Image (tube, helix red, strand yellow):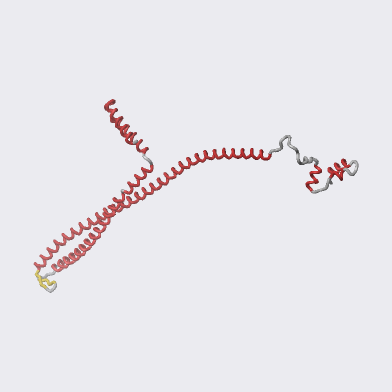
């Protein structure tokens, strides 16, 4: 599919170059843009999510490298701080010694005694000059070291902030990918649910039709089973059922023959009817 799209784009660009001349680049760029959009839409979402995961995973080596660089710089800054501290102590000691010699030379004397040894004024002045020269160099070196420490500390802080932002962005991208993956799964579930609903509706319709057919067949079978199975011309073996309501009532409640009581007197029929009607 992708190969066909690319080949079609190239053919379209070649045809445009042959037909429209100077406008070929415009047509070609437009066609290429459309082809790129078509290719991008043709790529499955799951594949794009895998690409995004891989891109996020590719950030891990860079994050690791940044962490190693920061760790090394922290160690170097610790060593530089120790070096500055030692240099500062030596500078303080040198300054105190220079100030001592300076103070001694203000005195009106020619011989000075230090650590059990005697020195004349000229020797003290020369020693003071040498010490002062070394002190100025050491003081400048200490200043440079402090400037270096400040600059490297600022760079380290910037690197830490960059690393923090990188890790935060990586975590955010991972969260976004997880959310997109969950959304993709929900979409797939929704699409599958729609297919299942359509399938269920079709099955439901067929099931309803089958049940209705079974119900009709059972109704027919029941009606046939309860139908009168007496055929014309057969000999009736049992007497016909009486339709006299009095006999039916007497049989139901276990009474005697009601015709005997009623026929005992004349006008009994009328009395029986009256007795039936006037109950209270």
Residue at 40%, 46% in the rendered image: 181
51 vs 20, nearest the viewer:
51
Extreme residue in the right direction: 266
Q: Position of residue 102 (x, y in %)?
A: 15, 66
Residue at 80%, 49% in the rendered image: 254
Q: Position of residue 267 (x, y in %)?
A: 90, 41
Name which quarter of the figure residue 40 lies in.
top left
Residue at 25%, 59% in the rendered image: 75
128 vs 203, nearest the viewer:
203
Residue at 75%, 38% in the rendered image: 235
- Res. 26 visible in picture: no
* Horizontal arrangement in the rendering, residue 27 relative to residue 106 (left or right): right
Q: Position of residue 128 (x, y in %)?
A: 13, 65
Q: Is residue 104 depicted above or below 33 in this figure? A: below
Q: Quadrant of the N terminus?
A: top left
- Res. 115 visible in picture: yes
121 vs 141, nearest the viewer:
141
* Horizontal arrangement in the rendering, residue 206 relative to residue 276 (left or right): left
Name which quarter of the figure residue 249 lies in.
top right
Extreme residue in the top direction: 19
């Amino acid at each position: 599919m992708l190969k066909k799209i690319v080949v079609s784009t190239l053919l379209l660009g070649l045809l445009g170059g042959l037909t429209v001349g100077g406008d070929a680049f415009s047509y070609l760029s437009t066609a290429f843009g459309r082809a790129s959009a078509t290719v991008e839409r043709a790529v499955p979402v799951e594949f794009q999510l895998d690409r995004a995961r891989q891109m996020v995973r590719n950030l891990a080596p860079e994050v690791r490298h940044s962490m190693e660089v920061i760790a090394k710089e922290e160690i170097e800054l610790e060593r530089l701080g120790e070096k500055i501290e030692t240099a500062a102590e030596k500078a303080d000691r040198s300054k105190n010694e220079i100030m001592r010699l300076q103070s001694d030379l203000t005195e009106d004397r020619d011989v000075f005694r230090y650590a059990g040894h005697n020195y004349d004024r000229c020797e003290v002045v020369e020693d003071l000059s040498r010490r002062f020269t070394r002190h100025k160099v050491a003081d400048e070196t200490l200043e440079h070291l402090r400037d270096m420490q400040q600059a490297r500390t600022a760079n380290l802080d910037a690197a830490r902030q960059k690393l923090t932002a990188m890790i935060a962005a990586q975590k955010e991208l991972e969260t976004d990918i997880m959310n997109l993956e969950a959304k993709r799964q929900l979409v797939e579930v929704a699409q599958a649910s729609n297919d299942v609903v359509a399938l269920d509706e079709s099955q439901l319709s067929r099931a309803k039709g089958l049940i209705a057919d079974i119900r009709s067949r059972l109704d027919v079978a029941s009606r046939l089973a309860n139908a009168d199975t007496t055929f014309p011309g057969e000999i009736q073996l049992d007497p016909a059922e009486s339709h006299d309501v009095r006999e039916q009532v007497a049989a139901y409640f276990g009474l005697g023959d009601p015709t005997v009581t009623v026929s005992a007197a004349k006008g009994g029929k009328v009395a029986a009817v009256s007795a039936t009607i006037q109950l209270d």
